[in-house]
Amino acid sequence: MGTWGTGLFADDLACDIRDHYRELIEDGIEDDAATRLTVEKYRAYLEEPDGVALLALAVTQARLGRLDPDIRNRALDLLDRGADLDEWERESPKQLPRRRVVLEKARALLTGPQPVRKRVRPPRRVLSGLATGDILAFVLPQRVALLRVVRVRKHRLGESPVLEELDFDGAEIPTVDVIERLGPKPEDPIAFAHALFPDTRLHAFVMGGIDWERAGFQKVQTIGARTGDEQAPLPGSGISWAELAEKYRRRYGSQ
C-alpha cells in the first residue's frame, strides 16, 4: 500500500475501498449489501484504530448520498481520536497542517446535511467486435501478419481479446484450409517475451470499440476453437491496436 499525498484518496488502500464500494453500487447491489460486502472484504483495515480505511468508506458513501449510520459513527469516533495525525506528525511534520485540513473536511461532510442519494450508472462496456477463432490480418506491401483470437475475456468494463500470432510467412492472405493448419509463431513473436514471462500471447486493449479496424487490421476468417482456448489466462503482455500495428510496420515495413 502506498501514499503519495495528504489527500484522503492519495492512498492505495483508500482508493481500493472507494472503488470496490462504488463498483458494487454501479452493479446494482443494494446499499446495505454493498456496505456489508465491503466491510467483509476489508474488515482488518476497517478495524485499525488510526487507519484511513474507515474514513475512505464513510466519505465515499456520503458523496453518493448513501452514508450508513454505523459507518458514520465509527468514522467520527476515529476522527475524535485524531485518526492518523500522530503518524503524520512523526513521518511528515511539514505536511501535518494539510492533513489536518483534509480530516476537518471529512468531518464536515459526515456531520453536515447529506447529499441527495445519487443514481450511479454502471460504466459503459466497450466491446471488441471479436470472437474466439477470428483471424485478423495486417497487410503490408511484402508481408501479411496473422493473429488468431484465442478467446475474448469479458469483464465489467468491456472485453480483452487474447491474441496469438500465427506462424505464417507470405505476402497474401492464405485460404482457410492453410490457416487452420497454422500453429503459433515459435520464434521472435510480436508479443513481449522474457525468460520470466515465456507466454508469447498478448492481449489487446479495447479503448474505443472496434479500434482494430481503425488500426488497419481486417477480419479475414473465423476458425474453430482449439483445445485449451477457453482456459487460456490473460497474458501479462498487453498492447493497444495502434501500437501493435506500428510494431508490425517497423518490423516488416522495409521488406
Image (tube, rainbow, N blue to C red):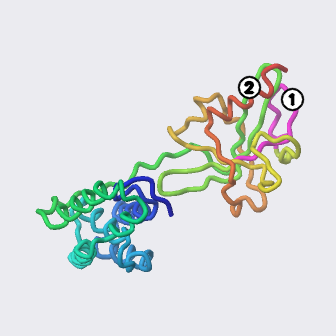
- The kind of secondary structure element at disc 2 is helix
Q: Residue at x 45, y 49 (%)?
A: 125
| Residue range corresponding to the magenta coloring | 163-179
Q: Position of residue 55 (x, y in %)?
A: 31, 68
157 vs 229, left or right, is left
Asked if residue 127 is positioned above or below residue 219 in the image, the reply reads below
Question: Three-letter amino acid code at disc 2?
Answer: Arg
Q: Nearer the viewer, residue 143 or 189?
A: 189
Q: Residue at x 46, y 60 (%)?
A: 12
Residue 249's tag is 2
Q: Position of residue 239 (x, y in %)?
A: 64, 42
Q: Residues within 10 Å of mark 2 (few under 14, many from 20)?
A: some
13 vs 172, left or right, is left
Residue 170's tag is 1
User: Label 1 to label 2, Cα distance in Å?
Assistant: 15 Å
Question: Three-letter amino acid code at disc 1?
Answer: Gly
Asked if residue 161 is positioned above or below residue 85 in the image, the reply reads above
One can see residue 177 in this view: no
Q: Marks 1 and 2: which is nearer the front?
A: 2
Q: Nearer the viewer, residue 226 or 186?
A: 186
Q: Which tag, 1 or 2, sits closer to the chain's start?
A: 1
Q: Nearer the viewer, residue 58 or 124?
A: 58
Asked if residue 115 is positioned above or below residue 214 in the image, the reply reads below
